[in-house]
Amino acid sequence: MYSPKTLKYFNNPKNYGKIKNPDGVGKVGNIVCVLPTTRILVNGEVKDIQEVKKGDLVLSHDGQYQIVNNVFRRKVAEKILVIKNKMGVNYVTSDHLIFGAKIPKTWYFSFTKRKKRFTQNLAWDHASDLEKRDLIAYPIFNKIKDIKRMPINFPKSRWDFKSKTLPKSVKINSNFLRLIGYYLAEGYAQDEVSKTRVGFVFNSKEIEYIEDVRLIVKKLFNLEAKISANKHNSTNIYFNSVVLVKLFKQLAGKGAAHKCVADFIMALPLNKQAELIVGLWRGDGYFNTTRAWPRAGYTTVSLRLAQQLKMLLLRQGIIASVYEEKAKEINGVKHQQSYRLHVGERGSLLKLAQILKTPLKITKEIRIRTWTENGYVFLPITDIKKINYRGEVYNLEVAKTRSFTSDAFCLHNCGDVMWLYIKVGKNKKKEEIIKDIKYETFGCVAAIATSGQVTELAKGKTISQALAISKDAIVKELGGLPPVKLHCSVLAVDALAEAIYDYLNKNKRPIPESLTKQHQIIQKHRGIIEEKYHDWVEKEEEMLKND
């Protein structure tokens, strides 16, 4: 646990900010990374971090998509952490900062209503400091942009004599969104010669849904349906139109594994998105209300659709667990790899039932372990362990917010990073002193507190006195630090040393041999192991100037 003084410095930082035209700047930090296969929410879809490129947009902790300024990779041979919650598993280096809240491990705080008091002061904690039951704050995409109509501007082929001309635009209303949901779950698009159609395959008993599709397409596109009975008690309802095929391929993809939700749909108002969920659930979803503990779920073979549906549900306040089913063969039938969303907590079930207009009566209490609040879903860590890893790891440089979201966690794009600025003046004895000193820190509670404390200790001191400040002095002034946080005090001392080195170097002043050696060690071990990472630190400073 942190001392009261440490928490005071964290909650009310002293000397925080920048100095205009500083005489010296110290920049230090830790390198943190994730495995190449870490799934990142990027450009409205899901990609392995090794596939992310400069210029892509990633979901950040503010619930918005921010631009990627650079992508870095390096090789490691070390222990890394495997951290799990109900949305997935991530592999991260031990110093990686994860957004959330630490929860005391006592019986008293095992109840959700008592945990909620900690969500008002969220922080970036090192992965190595996290434990089971600590809370992860996962951002919910919060952009809302309504679109009333969408143009349909696909020209027909000169040889297309069968397709009926469609309207020049279509209303983006509840019927349209429900139709897209039906297509994502049960639809197909054929664009073969003489077989160009958009179709939907339902169970023959689902007469209501078949009729719903027929009426929607008739009303929106003025197309007549063709209906045929298939084997295995299914019914095929389809519409012959080249333009309709192009439209649905653009809006929702083609082929079960490539189904997805168009970007503009992901930002529509919640009432419209609710109708999309209705169509999806009527197709590939289920809602079992006959059990004492009701449950609902959805299954798809499209990873992108699974993650998009997870986010659509979160926007409605519905929290789903995400499970991955490996490809398998059962009784001679091959099943593709699939993704299953499970809804089982009381609040989420009630909200989903309301959207689906499904009568629901919960007869037994279901314990609440997750909830949404202030733009985040709060999820407890369910498992955490260390493993040995040798290979490449990746990190992103993200503009403005400096964070990115994986399929399960919100991650800082750096470890503890400190920028320390000094202004040098003279005292009555004509000695050079640190007249003003400020800092900016992106890190955990201890990183912010130690940064603030070192500025308090250094202000007014001579250059030699400031260089004599030790990590032990910082820790003592703060009333102690947890053992795993002592490295933060080292960073604070290093940042001060680098700022003084920068001042002496720029002014061509003699530099003590001990300071030169310290500078060389910092340059080697504090964030510039690779030339690219050094460039990243330089660019971060430029971004700070432009913020």
Image: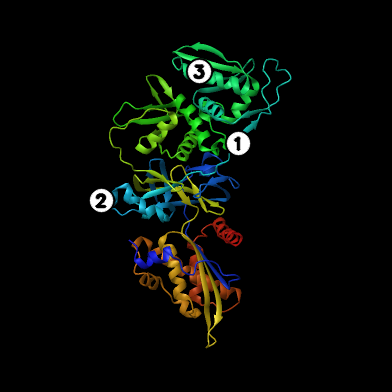
Q: Secondary structure at mark 1?
A: loop
Which of disc 3 and disc 2 is earlier in sequence?
Answer: 2
The amino acid at mark 2 is: Trp
Query: Residue 169 appears at what percent x and percent y?
Result: 66, 28
Categorize mark 2 by other alpha carbons within 10 Å: few (<14), some (14-19), many (20+): few
Mark 1 vs mark 3, foreground winner is 1
The amino acid at mark 1 is: Ile
- Image quadrant where residue 506 sits: bottom right
The mark found on residue 107 in the picture is 2
Q: What residue is shown with label 1?
A: 147
Question: In the picture shown, does residue 253 fall above or below 453?
Answer: above
| Residue contact at pointers 2 and 3, CB within 8 angstroms | no
The residues bearing labels 2 and 3 have C-alpha atoms spaced at a distance of 52 Å
The residues bearing labels 1 and 3 have C-alpha atoms spaced at a distance of 27 Å
Mark 1 vs mark 2, foreground winner is 1
Front residue of 200 and 389:
200
